[in-house]
Image (tube, rainbow, N blue to C red):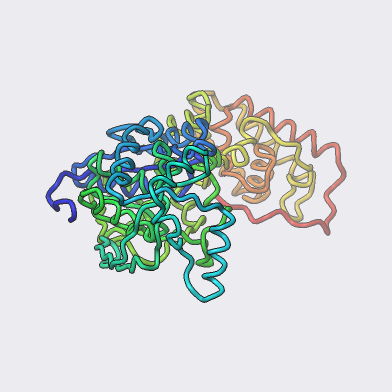
Amino acid sequence: MAINEKSKVRVRIAPSPTGYLHIGTARTALFNWLFARKNAGTFVLRIEDTDLERSEKRFEKDIIEGLKWLGLEWDEGPIRQSDRLEIYEKYISKLLEDELAYYCFCSKEELETERQAMLTQGFAPKYSGKCRSLAAEEVKKKLKAGTGHVIRFKVPETKITFKDLIRGNIAFDTALIGDIAIAKNPRAPLYNFAVVIDDEEMKISHVIRGEDHIANTPKQILIQKALGFPHPHYAHLPLILDPDRSKMSKRYSATSIQDYRDAGYLPEALTNFIALLGWHPQGEKEVLNMAEIVQEFDLGRVQKAGAVFNVNKLDWLNSQYIRNTGNEIIAQKLQLAPTKENLKIIEITKGRMKKLTDFKELAGFFFELPNYPPALLIWKDASKKNIIGNLKSAEEILAAVSEESFIQANLEKLLMPLAEERGRGEVFWPLRAALSGSETSPGPFEIMEAVGKKETIKRIKAAIIRLGNVERQNPDAKSSPKLKF
């Protein structure tokens, strides 16, 4: 019995606070959020923290902050399983009373011996059912003695078939599963049991999760049947793979969303990238804002094959978002004061940035000139004397320009006649090197407008002094790179 197709859409993301929020969980959260928004549904945040030994508040905090940073605000929650132990106890007690579950007292050593015996005989390992028929008195005696135990669900031997919204019909032979553990005790449920209760109590209509949960689905459907619950619709997302199509390595999957944030990725770029991990819109457009993704999102366009994580594509997408983000917002993210000078520097630099963290390397010279070698000022085989002369001539021209007129277009107009007379390379290369202290940088006119007249003159004077303190460049030395504007 499945949930009615016309029922209100209710989905959930249910992370365990046993680690940081990573790409896989973020992708699952995003697809659930998109499905809810596309269908005017409800997105629920559920914290599955019944593993008391491994669950930590710091991980829960990271998950919540990561989802908020990505823009995946939830409609209900966070709901914590640790606050719902009485609810689980009620349903476990019902299964025990109805003799659909039982206490199992087999030790880990016994279970491992059974497992090895089955493997040796060529069978898939499963629980033998040894404790299934224990007398009630014996069970009471063992419980009173404090014998270690779990509670197992009696798995009937049958065929389970369910329709996956991405993969079509999937069938399982439950005879291969064996009786599954559903709780350590009535107030300590295990995963497959707790999610069934939660999904029913929270009226979840669609379970959208990774394909690694496909094998859990028949177990959960059997528990649903035993308790008389309808089962939700299922959609299992493809695995995320490394570029060589192997299972995603720790290089990416173990990297938390916070790490991507610290590395200089914008949340809009990361959500755009994650959305394309296994789903594709109609047409060729890849830079999509959240509203566009919601409008296009359809589980029918989710692929079955693994989704390749391409960090180069992520970098490219991020660069597109940086270019299209307002300078004031970039300044805020870089924790820079939104002064006229800083905004101009951002405008000059952001077209070359792949990540926000590139700003320091690309724009550092605007704030502090590096200690560059004097040879950097020499254009190809030009003489030191000519370079110094060109810098002095440029300085004289610039000194006569007012602060108000010290803008890129005007500076280019004033200096171009000098460059046409003495050679563009011999004028503009040393000028740019003097202003940036780097072989690669924006053009000299952009830099001059950004740093202002006073700093421009200061840097040119320093370059002249620097050249005057060294001998003429070795003619065999490496030529300066070709000038680019």
Q: Is residue 137 above or below residue 405?
A: below
**Residue 190 at what x, y percent from top left?**
42, 45
Q: Is residue 118 visible?
A: yes
Residue at the spot x=24%, y=54% of the render? Answer: 225
Q: Can residue 413 be seen in this view?
A: no
Comparing 453 with 114, the one in front is: 114
Comparing 318 with 470, the one in front is: 318
Q: In which quarter of the image is residue 187?
A: top left
Comparing 438 with 189, the one in front is: 189
Residue at the spot x=48%, y=58% of the render? Answer: 309
Q: In which quarter of the image is residue 394?
A: top right
* Outermost residue toward the right in this view: 471
**Residue 267 at what x, y percent from top left?**
42, 40
**Residue 113 at what x, y percent from top left?**
58, 63
Q: Is residue 56 above or below residue 5?
A: above
Q: In which quarter of the image is residue 400?
A: top right
397 relative position to 16: left or right: right
Residue at the spot x=38%, y=42% of the render? Answer: 14
Number of numbered tags placed on the structure image: 0
* Outermost residue toward the front in this view: 137
Q: In this view, does 177 lie above or below 441?
A: below
Q: Quadrant of the N terminus?
A: bottom left
* Outermost residue toward the left in this view: 6
**Residue 398 at what x, y percent from top left?**
60, 31
Comparing 74 with 258, the one in front is: 74
Residue at the spot x=81%, y=56% of the render? Answer: 477
